[in-house]
Structures are given as structure tokens and as C-alpha cells.
Amino acid sequence: MLHQLKSFSYAFKGIGYTITHEGHFRFHMVAAAYVIYFGIRFYHFTAAQWGVLAVLIALVLSVEVINTSIERLCNKVQTSYDDIIRIAKDVAAGAVLIAAIAAVAVAVVFFLDFEIISSIFNFYITHIVNLIALIASIILSVLFIALCKSKEK
């Protein structure tokens, strides 16, 4: 049992490392948070739709973690330029891009409802405090993504 608990702590350390060192991972986290917020607040998704969103969010975040591990390992193995290392890193980044494109495609299908989008605008126009809170959250999100610089690479 202690071994399993240690395994979980190592996994959480890996996720923590990725959060503190990878702006793209933080971007995907913020995007996932907004998907969940707007999905809960304004949309009436089925359990199946929530399942698809959960799997896609987990997929994008997981592939980003794998990409980070591949990049770090490549940087450790080869410190000077190497074409094979570049290809490995590019392919790993491509995997993230494929997952992100799939997530965006599903988000467009699920969220592109002009009646609901109109009601969202009307809600924020008539509820100024909520609009201010949304703007503040966007500013904090941008700061979290852009200014949380890595201590090491």
C-alpha cells in the first residue's frame, strides 16, 4: 500500500512540474476550466457529452505531460543540436496538436449554439458584477499562463 501511495506522490510531482514549467499545459488547464464553467453554467449537456469533454480534457493534458517528458529526456540525452532529437520533439508536439484540434472540433460542435451564446451575452450585460468577475478571471488566467515562468528547463 505504501508503494502505491509513493507512486501517486511521484505522479503528482510530475504534474506539478509540468504546471510550473510549461505554459502550454497551463493554457490547456485554463481552457478546460472555462469549458467546464460555461458547460455547467449555460449548457445542458448530456452525461455522454460530459464524458466526451472529460476524456478530451484528460487526453490533451496527458499528451502535454508526455510531450514535456519527451522534451526533457531529449534535452538530457543530447545537449547539442541533433536532427533525430528534433524530429522526436516535433512528433511529440504534433501529438499534442492533434489532441488539441480534436478537442476544439468537439467544443465547436457542443458549444456553437447561437441562442445560448446570445443568452450568455445577455446574462453578462445585465449582471455587471458577474461580468467584472469574468474579466478578472480572464486577466488572472492570462497572468497564470504567461507569467508563471519556469525555474529551470
Image (spheres, helix red, strand yellow):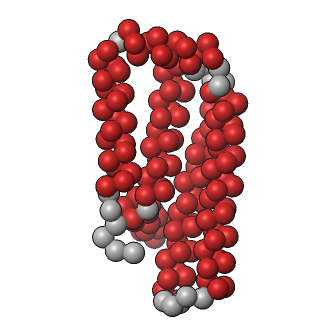
Residue 83 or residue 13, whichever sits in front:
83
Side of 45 relative to 128 (left or right): right
Q: Position of residue 93 (x, y in %)?
A: 61, 65
On-image quarter of the C terminus: bottom left
Q: Is residue 106 visible?
A: yes
Give the image quarter of residue 63: bottom right
Tell me if residue 38 comes above or below residue 122 in the rendering. below
Q: Which residue is depicted at the point 53% across and 75% down?
A: 71
Residue found 62% across the figure and 27% down from its top: 111
Total of numbered circles in the picture?
A: 0
Can residue 13 be seen at all in this image of the molecule? no
**x 31%, y 41%: residue:** 140
Front residue of 137/19: it is 137
50 w.r.t. 117: above or below: below
Using the image as rendered, state which of residue 62 and residue 68 is in the foreground: 68
Above or below: residue 115 compared with residue 63: above
Residue 72 screen position, x and y as percent: 49, 77
Q: Residue 79 location, x and y as percent?
A: 48, 89
User: Measuring 43% from the left and 62% from the top, which residue is drawn there?
Assistant: 22
> In the image, residue 116 lies at what x, y percent?
58, 16
